[in-house]
Image (tube, grey):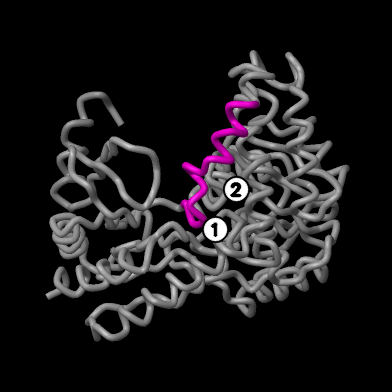
Amino acid sequence: MKPKDLSAALAKLEAEFLKRERKTPENPCGPEMLLNGRKLIAFASNDYLGLANDDSLKQGAMTAIEQWGVGAGASQLVSGRLGIFATLEQACADFAQREAAVYFPSGFLANLGVLTTLADRHDVIFADRINHASLIDGALLSRAQHVRYQHTDMDDLARKLAHTPVAEGSARLIVTDSVFSMDGDEAPLPALLDLAIQYDAWLIVDDAHGLGVLGPQGRGSIADARLPAHPNLIMIGTLGKAAGVSGAFVAGNRDLVEWLIQRARTYIYTTGASPMLAGALLASLQRIIQGDDLRSQLNDNIAAFRSGIAALNLPYALLPSRTGIQALVIGDNEATLKIAARLLEQGYWVPAIRPPTVAAGSARLRISLSAAHTPAHIQGLVQAIGCACQ
């Protein structure tokens, strides 16, 4: 795109109801937000357990600052890995029940790092059609052949694995979200691992929205599916959603983690994260493990919301989901924006999701539920949606 083309391109986005707007809240992340001095009930964040402003996480961050300061200075391979990050990576490995883990400053960097390190132009990546953008970009940057299978369709994946030529000595990688971020449905992980073993492929699971919410002690979708610690299985655990902080870990066997440290460009050439994040995350992992009370409250909120929406008999589909992601598909971009605006007028912040984040014709309200929401918050939202959709 040429510099002179930017104004016209932005105007085109606005005309198609696709231009995004950044809102600026005036208080910390939580279920109640201040926007332009007005109190709103927010259903926009992925803070599923309500930990983003938790006192124990804030104390963990402050304690880390006192001992370790606020900056890392350079890449961990240049100026060293601060001791608190060694502690965090061991805690992440223990949490994932794997031999080792390495921390990346964001989930996007972790996904790019894994795919571009394990695949190159000789290899083939088999990816779910609605994987997160970071997995799509990682596949493209790897230069591997990128074969997309129909969403959660194991028959289609099996056919593509069987009929896609792979050169001798080259690798297959199966790549999937665990919980899909705009629908809230889940990948069939046991069947995926079976296929990965059959074809000696990597199975890379981005557990962005399952970690903290699903599985025993909130250990995520892989634990929920009771998958073994197979050497072909890689867990990417995002720490900026239910964990309430930021970053991600990659967990697997020791050789995998060492290879990522040696070759992942998004690890090697990135300044190390602030130690205050490690302090907050160590507190977060403990709260997640001990957080059955939070998961119970979240599940109660999910059930109340779904039953409330069902009772409205709306002309729109609420997609199946047992997670904090609840998607009400409206379809038309303009109609979706209007409903979101009506909700905002009633004091409820619910984001309108439009292409290219979702497919054309499937614009939706993405309602993110949290353990921090009260029954009154849920009841009020359901009533507001009923009014906004009239």
Label 1: which residue?
209
Which residue is at 30% across, 46% downward? Answer: 33
Which residue is at 68% across, 48% downward? Answer: 286
Describe residue 2's horizontal placement relative to residue 83 as left or right: left
Image coords of residue 306 (percent x, y): 38, 78
Residue 265, located in which quarter of the rendered image?
Answer: top right
The C terminus sits in image quarter: bottom left
Front-lying residue, 387 or 340: 387
Answer whether residue 56 is magenta in the image.
yes
Instruction: Give the spatial CA distance, label 2 vs label 1.
Output: 8 Å
Describe residue 198's horizontal placement relative to residue 237 as left or right: right
Which residue is at 15% across, 68% downward? Answer: 388
Q: Identify the amino acid type marked 2.
A: Thr
Q: Secondary structure at mark 2?
A: strand
Say if residue 127 shows up in the picture: no
Q: Secondary structure at mark 1?
A: loop
Describe residue 206's horizontal placement relative to residue 165 as left or right: left
Image coords of residue 84 (percent x, y): 73, 28
Image coords of residue 351 (percent x, y): 29, 55
Label ID, residue 218: none
Asked if the residues shown at circle 2 and circle 1 are in contact, with their CB atoms under 8 angstroms apart, the answer is: yes
Label ID, residue 238: 2
Total marks placed: 2
Query: Badge 2, how many Cα within 10 Å: few under 14, some, many 20+?
Result: many
Residue 330, located in which quarter of the rendered image?
Answer: bottom left
Q: Identify the amino acid type marked 1.
A: His
Say if residue 307 shows up in the picture: yes
Front-lying residue, 106 or 371: 371
Answer whether residue 103 is magenta in the image.
no
Which residue is at 64% across, 72% downward? Answer: 157
The N terminus sits in image quarter: top left
The boundaries of the magenta stretch are: 47-63
